[in-house]
Image (cartoon, rainbow, N blue to C red):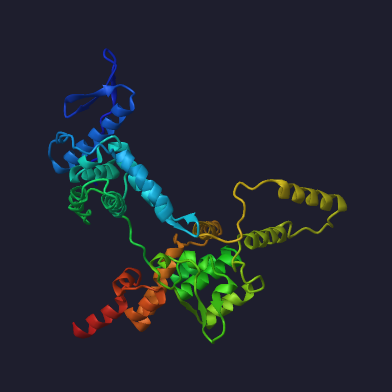
Amino acid sequence: MPKKIRVPKLRHYTPKNLAVVRLDGRDRYIGKYGSPESVEQYHRLIAEWLEAKADGETVASPPAEAVCQLSVSEMLVRYWKFAKSYYQKDGKPTHELACMRDAIRPLRKLYGRSRATEFGPLKLKAIRQHMIDVQSLARTEVNKRIGRIKRVFKYAVSEELIPPSVFEGLRTVDGLRFGRTTARETEPVTPVAAADVEATLPYVSPQVAAMIQLQDLTGMRPNEVVQLRPADIDRSAEIWIFEPRDHKNRWRGHRRIVPLGPKAQAILIPYFDRSTESPCFSPKEAEEWRNEQRAKRRDPNRKTPVYPSELKAREKRKQQRKKQKRKRPLRDCFDVASYRRAITYGIKKAKKNGVVIAHWHPNQLRHSCATRIREAHGIEAAQVVLGHARADVTEVYAERNLELAKRIAGQVG
């Protein structure tokens, strides 16, 4: 575990009302204390100081002023106007827009008042070190955010806001490599054990249990299974075809086709008793089921009759609960987050009842399905079922058959 670097604080030099920070035993005065310029300069110096510490070098002096007067903040304002109209689907902003906002936040914080033409590879590396030391981001997430910052400058070049040399310089900054950086590593997503899935099912609602079983059989993504509607399923043939109206690669013009066999059909049939445009799996129905189960568990050993006064009191409490506003109103359709929370709730409930279950999440079901298909039918079959354009992407999801490798090793020595 690398030793954590102690970041110097911004101090107030009261005789002259200046902001000062001490770096490597040397005081640096960075303008009027409390001014936006001094705060930005402080964050910039700390980021460059951390980068220099990581490389064992001294902090470079700022480059000479360029001719172009466009600041980084002004460039970001123009880019954000473009991003809000580009990163949207069906009139709603996509998740990528939020990711772009998180990526450009340190760029604006550290170098917002700098000229865009002065921004180069060393400054980009300083932002990267800021993400590692201050934000404590994982290596893969740092690489993604640095790539998004490069995309911002690529846009600025395409709009002739900055010269192409700026973007070409940033392209020379390679991504962080495994084992060659102080950034932390994340654990890879692995298949979930079938025993853990089976043990979780009794402790979730029938709607969540059906989604779990369906995803485990078909290898669908979580956002595909939560949006499933009767109208999206072609039932004209023996094998039904589900085509999600929204999926990960829709913006690329790709189609997503999910075949549904007999087992998947048996899971879905009870949820066709609704409008074809309504989602099959509803949080409201799951809440109604939980209330029914709660009512059944109330006083199971009671022998005395329930008097009318008690029935009236129960009805009064029921009406009061209906009038109370929920902190989070129930939706007509699950989303990926609520689906994941429902599984986590089931796991915690199982543990309270003495059932030991390792924590797992919906994405692992996709990995489990891919692994089973690869073992039985090969990597190409797993690629087709998961809907990947390239087999090397499927390699990430389908774990290699270790048992087969062991049998071969036993035969060939």
Q: Which of the pair 259/399 is nearer the observer?
A: 259
Name the image quarter holding residue 349.
bottom right
Q: Which of the pair 176/305 is nearer the observer?
A: 176
Percent x, y of residue 29: 22, 23
For image coordinates 79% across by 48% down, the residue present is 316
Percent x, y of residue 310: 82, 50
Percent x, y of residue 409: 22, 80
Name the image quarter holding residue 88.
bottom left
Percent x, y of residue 138: 31, 51
Residue at the right extreme of this rendering: 308
Q: Quadrant of the C terminus?
A: bottom left
Q: Which of the pair 61/75 is nearer the observer?
A: 75
Location of residue 62 with respect to 313 vertically, above or below: above
Location of residue 329 with respect to 230 vertically, above or below: above
Q: Is residue 350 left or right of residue 77?
A: right
Residue at the left extreme of this rendering: 57
For image coordinates 60% across by 57% down, the residue present is 331
Name the image quarter holding residue 105.
top left
Residue at the top extreme of this rendering: 15
Count the labels in the image: 0
Q: Is residue 385 left or right of residue 61?
A: right
